[in-house]
Image: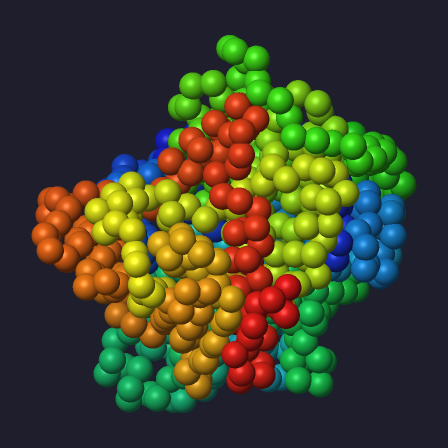
């Protein structure tokens, strides 16, 4: 299929061939009929991509702050690779469309194949021929509403949420500053609510359009006519509410809002304009400044948007989906007319030229629609063509350890998942390694597969996992997806006879771990490695060698200054993805066990009330103990990982994989010169590829991988009971 994409580093726009997204449970696969270009938000993104690196930094100071924080934690080289990897990738455009349901995922019962739906979301309603859309981000289109009009659903929801934040009342007067796409919709929504509207925009054509759609008067912000109209309509008191629907760097909109708003009026920010509030003006009138967050409640909440968990209507009347359905109903009943806003309809294949014309000002438009081929876009509820789903290849029950590769034959690898970790920490090492061929990348979203194929040279990009698992020429499969899918994907790959490299965690529950081990037993295939890379870090390996063998028990302390998570991080989805420690904790348990040359036999865990700070004490067969302090409340300026190992009159010290030292009869200290943090990914991958090529043992015994996973899972059990957990019983 085809999709509109942009490279944020170079600014290049393209219509790219990408794999068809998979139809996951909890959502539907939608074939686009029309998608809407947001001439404000999208053109701002397109313009930013064309800036220099300095210009990009100036336009996004929030992202610059994140980069500086990453430098403090991960160092300059790792941060540079991560940032440049993100910049030099294809990114999607679009967030508002209408299309026909082509496939229905498990758990969806409110629509069927052939239904017309309006879709929302900058990850799900993209300018693409096909999109997978989760349940709470689509709404059925009312009978009689044309698909080209239903494509306005998302931007209409943004305008509707802004009006709700203004709490407009019948008979009030409002000022709308900025008469672009959102502003024009706000004018109509307010008029439909019985509110008299004055509009402000420097473009006379937009002012005339707003008056035609119901505004009482409109004019240039510098015009005395605007102030005169406000004075006449309000008896000189000023408007009850102001809606800021303008963009740009001028502070004029907020200053005008203060001048024309009544005492204790409301100012609602919908657009992205400068908000340098003149304190005296806002203080003296005690103005109520409010923000409108996108489509409505549920936005940026992954449990709502991705998992389909609706908010009870008695507590949250208007959610994203309810706003979407409400706006569609208003358009269907004629209360809002979007047809006059359509300035241009372009064929989807002309997308690049359309964006160029908009950016350079050749095309003056309020709203532009893309019309998609291969579908009768005007036929409501037209039946979609059937999708042929390949039969699942039965697992190879007799799979066994593969023999060594013939000399000169490359090791062929497939990746399932191509997210940030895979593309910044794994694939750069593999792409430049001799004797490795990147055979296929499998993702559920088409663009991530296409990006990985372009950047790293995969021979194939697809959304069909079963075909890849059934390819006898693929030697090993990398599972680099979200945590909840690791165990099942690993199990399937093992049964298909593949060597498997699975990022941590291997499993989130005891049943999942048992399922993986059962697959090993059933297939006879134990070719598995979990991404516990720290034991492969060169600095830590050298420190362990200099520390030497132990004769007595050891005491190990591991401080992990994990820090807080950004709002919206999928790590917060504990209901489906497990706790944060369940996802990350295996790293630190494996490192401790490797340093102590044994697997843990007991786990005791306590947590600090009110936050996620954990103290995990591991017991080992020889009496050694390891205490892992996993904290989220520390200073971001402090190193992320510090470790001390004490035994036999010696101390090993590791400072965040930058410096190490050993104190004994003789002191050893690694170089004090700053160096990049090497946490062992390259060496781990080299060891895995070597094992696959030679047919020799995996880098870490399966028993150790299972023990580390069981210990990680035992933390949750211990927290629930408040008692130590014996791992023999936990397994």
User: Can you see residue 221?
Assistant: no
Q: Residue furthest top?
A: 408
Q: Position of residue 316 (x, y in %)?
A: 65, 80
Q: Nearer the viewer, residue 99 or 572?
A: 572
Image quadrant holding the C terminus, namely bottom right
Q: Which residue is found at the position 52% from the left and 79% from the top?
A: 724
Quarter assignment of residue 162: bottom right
Q: How is the image coloured?
A: rainbow
Q: Position of residue 56 (x, y in %)?
A: 30, 44
Corner quadrant of residue 54: top left
Quadrant position of the N terminus in the picture: top right
Which is more toward the observer, 276 or 437?
Answer: 437
List x then y, in percent, for residue 335: 72, 66
The residue sitting at 57% across, 18% down in the picture is: 405
Q: Residue furthest right?
A: 383
Q: Give the total number of marks visible in the rendering.
A: 0
Residue at x 84%, y 61% (from the top left corner):
110
Residue 412 position in % (x across, y down): 57, 23
Residue plotted at (53% across, 44% down): 701
Q: Is residue 300 found left or right of 545 in the rendered image?
A: right
The one nearer the camera, 502 or 197, is: 502
In the rendered view, tell whether residue 326 sits above or below residue 89: below
Q: Is residue 12 visible?
A: yes
């Amino acid at each position: 299929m085809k999709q509109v994409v942009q490279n944020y580093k170079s600014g290049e726009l393209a219509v790219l061939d990408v794999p068809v997204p998979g139809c996951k449970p909890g959502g539907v696969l939608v074939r686009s009929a029309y998608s809407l270009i947001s001439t404000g938000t999208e053109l701002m993104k397109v313009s930013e991509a064309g800036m220099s690196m300095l210009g990009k930094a100036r336009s996004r100071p929030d992202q610059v702050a994140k980069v500086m924080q990453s430098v403090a934690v991960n160092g300059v080289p790792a941060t540079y690779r991560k940032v440049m990897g993100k910049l030099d990738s294809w990114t999607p455009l679009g967030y508002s469309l209408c299309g026909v349901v082509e496939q229905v995922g498990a758990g969806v019962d409110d629509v069927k194949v052939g239904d017309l739906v309006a879709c929302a979301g900058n990850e799900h309603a993209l300018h693409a021929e096909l999109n997978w859309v989760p349940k709470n981000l689509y709404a059925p289109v009312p009978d009689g509403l044309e698909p080209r009009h239903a494509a306005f659903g998302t931007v209409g929801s943004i305008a509707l949420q802004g009006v709700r934040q203004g709490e407009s009342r019948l008979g009030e007067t409002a000022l709308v500053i900025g008469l672009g796409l959102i502003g024009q919709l706000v004018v109509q929504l307010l008029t439909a609510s019985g509110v008299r509207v004055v509009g402000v925009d420097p473009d006379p054509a937009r002012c005339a359009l707003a008056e035609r759609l119901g505004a009482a008067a409109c004019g240039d912000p510098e015009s005395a006519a605007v102030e005169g109209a406000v004075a006449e309509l309000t008896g000189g008191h000023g408007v009850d509410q102001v809606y800021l629907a303008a963009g740009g760097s001028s502070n004029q909109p907020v200053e005008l809002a203060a001048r024309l708003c009544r005492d204790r009026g409301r100012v609602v920010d919908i657009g992205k304009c400068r908000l340098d509030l003149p304190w005296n003006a806002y203080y003296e009138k005690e103005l109520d400044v409010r923000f409108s967050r996108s489509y409505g409640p549920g936005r940026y909440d992954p449990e709502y948007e991705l998992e389909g968990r609706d908010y009870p209507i008695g507590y949250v009347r208007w959610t994203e989906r309810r706003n979407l359905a409400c706006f569609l109903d208003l358009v269907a009943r004629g209360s809002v007319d979007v047809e006059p806003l359509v300035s241009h309809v372009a064929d989807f294949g002309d997308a690049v030229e359309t964006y160029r014309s908009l950016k350079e000002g050749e095309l003056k438009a309020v709203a532009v629609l893309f019309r998609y081929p291969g579908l009768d876009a005007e036929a409501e509820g037209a039946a979609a063509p059937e999708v042929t789903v390949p039969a699942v290849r039965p697992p190879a029950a007799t799979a066994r350890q593969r023999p060594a590769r013939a000399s000169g034959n490359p090791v062929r690898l497939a990746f399932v998942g191509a997210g940030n970790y895979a593309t910044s920490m794994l694939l750069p090492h593999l792409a430049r390694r001799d004797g490795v061929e990147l055979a296929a990348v499998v993702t559920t979203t088409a663009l991530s597969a296409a990006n990985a194929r372009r950047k790293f040279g995969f021979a194939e990009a697809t959304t069909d996992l079963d075909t890849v698992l059934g390819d006898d020429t693929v030697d090993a499969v990398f599972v680099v997806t979200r945590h909840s899918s690791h165990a099942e994907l690993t199990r399937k790959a093992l049964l298909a006879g593949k060597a498997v490299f699975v990022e941590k965690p291997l499993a989130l529950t005891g049943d999942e771990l048992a399922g993986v081990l059962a697959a090993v037993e059933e297939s006879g295939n134990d070719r598995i490695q979990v991404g516990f890379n720290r034991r492969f870090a060169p600095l830590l390996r050298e420190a362990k060698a200099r520390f030497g063998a132990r004769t007595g028990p050891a005491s190990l302390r591991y401080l992990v200054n994990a820090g807080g998570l950004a709002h919206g991080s999928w790590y917060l989805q504990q209901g489906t993805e497990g706790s944060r420690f369940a996802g990350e904790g295996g790293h630190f348990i494996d490192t401790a066990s490797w340093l102590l040359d044994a697997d843990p036999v007991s786990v005791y865990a306590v947590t600090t009330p009110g936050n996620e700070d954990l103290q995990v004490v591991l017991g080992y067969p020889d009496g050694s103990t390891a205490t892992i302090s996993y904290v989220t409340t520390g200073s971001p300026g402090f190193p992320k990982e510090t470790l001390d190992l004490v035994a036999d009159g010696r101390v090993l010290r590791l400072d965040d994989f930058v410096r190490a030292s050993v104190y004994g009869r003789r002191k050893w200290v690694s170089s004090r010169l700053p160096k990049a943090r090497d946490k062992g990914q390259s060496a781990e991958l080299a060891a895995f590829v070597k094992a696959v090529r030679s047919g020799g043992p995996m880098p870490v015994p399966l028993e150790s991988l299972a023990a580390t996973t069981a210990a990680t899972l035992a933390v949750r059990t211990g927290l629930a009971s408040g008692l130590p957990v014996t791992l023999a019983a936990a397994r």
